[in-house]
Image (cartoon, helix red, strand yellow):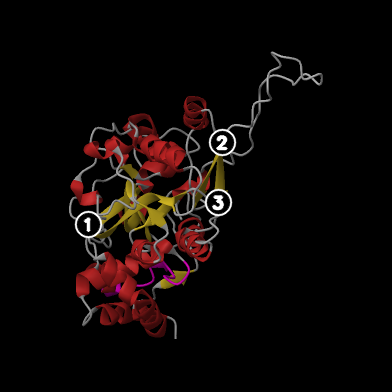
């Protein structure tokens, strides 16, 4: 799921520390043999991965191991690297493959099956692979966000649906991301396919183009550069972002605020689920299993909202106050079957490009 986590500190955890006795050069009885370095677990992730230092340290201390995070670009780039290096894997665990790229990874057979006992606390709706080659870790919804101040006077009123964006009163107000270069943009494209179907989604985008939709390369360009709400410095009051973005506006506000300056349009949101899996060829299979368990533990799950601004998958994970008060819950998000996305992704992107940009 690139994101509000651009505002968070990047964790780069590497290295290992050895300990043990010093060998006696005389070789006399009772000499301690040097202890080897602790095992190292390499986790390949997207660039937005973040966990508190103390939870990383807890895992390392409990397992007597070190953890190295291998950041590998966005979700699509990460999956491509994992597939290309399948025979000589770069890591032991992959974290952050989302539901739009999962089928590609599964078909490439890069994962080993593992069923964590912690899955008992995870709803079945998130457990999509019967062979348990991947484990759901978090989820988030891509939604339209609006600038509250711009629509406060009701002229025009805040949009309430995807269809509203084609009306003349919202001309020149919407900024979206290119699905060819942005996972957020891709999710919004998929939302329109899910809503309007194969016969209607291109017509919908043609109407958005006629209504002066603006397209940027990525989420940061759209949200911070062209959106007028919250931390944005642009002039467009409607942007594609996340259901959790209003909560992030409160958490990262320069001065304390009691209400987010942005809000979510709950119609037309698209769900993204992020998974982790143990990579084929690992020499640290048992340690990798313990890390999957760690990602599903309550302490880690309860840290996820304010670290990566997505929701935990555990039912019993408590949400922070900022999420309870300011993140809007999407009860019925749009979704497409993973195999349908995999079979049509490139064609949909090409047709979108032809419709919107040419």
Asked if marks 1 and 2 touch (Cβ < 8 Å), the reply is no
Q: Which of the two residues, 160 or 80, is positioned nearer the viewer here?
A: 80
Residues drawn in magenta: 167-181
> Neighbour class for label 1 at 10 Å: few (<14), some, many (≥20)?
some
Residue 200 shown left or right of residue 47 in the figure: left
Mark 2 or mark 3, whichever is nearer to me: 2
Q: Secondary structure at mark 3?
A: strand
1 or 3: tag closer to the N-terminus: 3
Inter-mark Cα distance, 1 to 3 = 29 Å
Could you say which disc has been placed on residue 333 in the image?
1
Could you say which disc has been placed on residue 39 in the image?
2
169 magenta-colored: yes
Could you say which disc has been placed on residue 71 in the image?
3
Q: Position of residue 147 (x, y in %)?
A: 36, 54
Mark 1 or mark 3, whichever is nearer to me: 3
Q: Position of residue 194 (x, y in %)?
A: 23, 69
1 or 2: tag closer to the N-terminus: 2
């Amino acid at each position: 799921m690139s994101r509000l986590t651009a505002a968070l500190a990047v964790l780069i955890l590497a290295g290992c520390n050895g300990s043990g006795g010093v060998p006696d050069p005389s070789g006399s009885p009772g000499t301690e043999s040097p202890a080897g370095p602790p095992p190292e677990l390499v986790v390949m992730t997207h660039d937005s991965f973040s966990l508190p230092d103390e939870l990383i340290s807890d895992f390392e201390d409990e397992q007597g191991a070190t953890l190295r995070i291998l950041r590998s670009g966005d979700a699509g780039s990460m999956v491509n690297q994992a597939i290309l290096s399948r025979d000589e894997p770069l890591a032991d665990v992959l974290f952050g493959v989302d539901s739009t790229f999962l089928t590609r990874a599964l078909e490439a057979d890069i994962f080993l099956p593992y069923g964590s006992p912690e899955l008992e606390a995870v709803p079945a709706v998130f457990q999509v692979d019967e062979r348990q080659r991947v484990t759901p870790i978090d989820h988030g919804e891509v939604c339209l966000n609006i600038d509250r101040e711009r629509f406060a006077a009701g002229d025009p009123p805040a949009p309430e649906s995807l269809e509203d964006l084609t009306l003349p009163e919202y001309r020149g107000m919407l900024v979206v991301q290119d699905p060819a270069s942005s996972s957020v943009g891709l999710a919004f494209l998929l939302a329109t396919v899910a809503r309007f179907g194969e016969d209607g989604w291109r017509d919908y985008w043609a109407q958005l183009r006629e209504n002066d939709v603006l397209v940027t390369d990525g989420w940061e360009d759209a949200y911070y550069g062209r959106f007028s709400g919250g931390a944005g410095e642009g002039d467009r009051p409607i942007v594609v972002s996340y259901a959790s973005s209003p909560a992030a506006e409160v958490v990262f506000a320069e001065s304390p605020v009691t209400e987010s300056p942005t809000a979510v349009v709950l119609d037309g949101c698209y769900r993204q689920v992020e998974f982790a899996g143990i990579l084929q060829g690992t020499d640290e299979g048992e340690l990798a299993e313990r890390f999957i368990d760690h990602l599903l533990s309550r302490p880690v799950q309860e840290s996820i909202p304010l670290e990566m601004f997505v929701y935990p998958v555990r039912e019993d994970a408590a949400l922070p106050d900022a999420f309870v008060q300011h993140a809007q819950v999407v009860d019925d998000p749009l979704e497409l079957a993973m195999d349908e996305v995999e079979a049509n992704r490139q064609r949909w992107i090409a047709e979108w490009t032809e419709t919107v940009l040419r």
